[in-house]
Image (cartoon, rainbow, N blue to C red):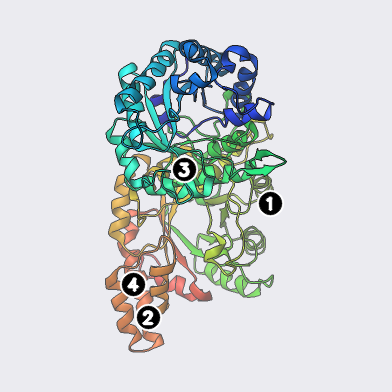
Amino acid sequence: MPPGFIERLGEGALIFDGGMGTSLYERGVFINRSFDELNLSNPALVRDIHAAFVRAGADIIETNTFGANRVKLTPHGVADKIREINLQGVKIARQAAGDKVLVAGSIGPLGIKIEPWGPTSVEEAKAHFKEQALALAEAGIDLYVIETFADINEIHQAILAAREAAPELPVMAQMTLGEDGSSLYGTAPETFAQRLESWGADVIGVNCSVGPAIMLEAVERMAAVAHRKISAQPNAGMPRSVEGRNIYLCSPEYMASYARRFLEAGASIVGGCCGTTPDHVHAIARAVRAAAPRKTVHALAVPQEVRSAAPTVARANKSGLSGKLAQGRFIRAAEVLPPKGFDTDKVLAGAQKLKDSGIDLVTIPDVPRGSARMSPQALALILETKLGLETLVHYSCRDRNLLGMQSDLLGHYALGLRNILCITGDRPKVGDYPDATAVFDVDSIGLTNMVRCLNQGVDVGGNPVGRPTGFYIGVTLNPTAVNLDEEVRRFEWKVEAGAEFCLAPFVYDVALLEAFMKRVAPSRIPVIAALWPLGSYENAEFLNNEVPGCHVPDKLLERMRAAAGQSRAAERAEGIRIAQETLAAVAPLVQGAQIAAAFGHYEVVQEVYSVLAGA
């Protein structure tokens, strides 16, 4: 038997299947038939659909029992077979699920209005739900999924019924939405999220009726108030009528991109509803397992039997940076921006000054703030070959898919680039081209997983790639994050995924960094603190208000404001003093620093480092 639902949920994101009803419809079943009755009259058809979703990568499949309650079965003349239909629905799903996939007993609304909106009492409604819930529990489901409810009062009775029928089984309760983001009865996501929790649902969520975009906002609103895990199963867009048939036009890639965004917004379970095919689920599974690794099993785990026979590279031997950190050396790094255009003369001249001053490492951002500059990989190769300077390349997930990133990384290693900083990347709308589009196939956690796989001699599919790479893997941390708990969780996931050192950008408040590092002490890896010397009061205001992850304390803003009242030279000098003070305070806490050659002022780097002993 597979681990239980709650245990699996604690390990990481789970993937549900897609739309059973639309799958049956696409296979020629008329919409006026009882889809649930097909469990008896055509079990092979139902089983084939389940099996297709299992092959696509679903962790959980739902029984074909969405409408298998007495109220909905009565018009089809099969209400006397309610128990048999539900038992058979579980049996068919279990046959397709095999040993690793969980089976959720699907319970949908009654299709009638209950009090106070209709004549059916809440007691009658609960009795109908309990009749179905008892049969599903008898057949051996792993959990209940109570789904597609518009009325908060009705779903309350369904939850109560499930709890009475089988108190030991987990309950997942999902409301459906209108185009305004509230339930079809007008209940706001913040309201029904708290109600579902108070009524005892183990997982709360939303499904059906709308596409991913509207559902994402609802998930964000639920996450702001919820304490339970959240699920999201949108339709594959809004249906279009094509020659009398309802067709859902969302591509698998589009659904997968939103699955990642659901996870970022706070969901733990993703899947699809109407119009969601096995192709959609396959794309969702690939995206989720790359972007959100589980706590005990890496998303891109490397099976022992396919690991490369060649030895992996020891951490201390991966690069000059890794070796110095292993020896306890304090790293002095400088950030250098790639040039606009292809002329590197100015950058080379500045980098030579940095090398002459004793800098250990030059770090190169990846298309900083979404602008059009030379690629950091090209500049890194030029600096390493022409000047012999070791580099740290920032590698962004933006606009790269899994296969493209894998090819890039293998090429980087072949060219001699050994240090890599895995980042998700800025969205273009914060850069110079607000109308540019972006593609995020994975985030920094998925990228870290990918590099770890290459370091073990396999690709993301577990296929050997020959001799393992020896990348020294870095990630970022943000001690000023609004949701610090989530940032801590993400940092722990990054370390579990394979991160070996981290960069803390825009350090101005040493106390915040120290507090964050205490929280992540069990997952501690070497930390390099990145400082940006403030060039002016306007620069400080811009960083504080418009650069994500950057917080300039009020006292520093006041110092820069006072300097601005004197002269530009005074502003520059004050910015350097602030950077020097910050460096002196942070140096005992970290294993290195990175000073930005802000606005091409390479001499500033050495001025800031002059406060350290032995400078």
- Where, by quadrant of the figure, is residue 559 drawn? bottom left
Location of residue 570 in the rendering, given as x and y in whole percent from the top left corner:
36, 85
Decide if residue 166 is in sight here. Answer: no
Q: Is residue 327 above or below residue 435?
A: above
Residue identified by numbered label 4? 578
For this view, does 483 lie left or right of residue 375?
Answer: left
Front of the two marks 3 and 4: 3
Residue 573: numbered disc: 2
**What amino acid is found at the position of numbered circle 1 in the picture?**
Leu
In front: 360, or 257? 257
- Where, by quadrant of the figure, is residue 519 drawn? top left
Location of residue 593 in the rendering, given as x and y in whole percent from the top left corner:
42, 60
For this view, does 34 lie left or right of residue 6?
Answer: right
Residue 263: numbered disc: 3
Residue 415: numbered disc: 1
Classed neighbour count for the residue bearing mark 2: other residues with Cα under 10 Å, few (<14), some (14–19), many (≥20): some
Location of residue 397 in the rendering, given as x and y in whole percent from the top left corner:
58, 51
**Secondary structure state at the residue bearing disc 1:** loop
| Mark before the other along the chain sequence, 4 or 2 | 2
The Cα atoms of the two marked residues, 1 and 4, are separated by 38 Å
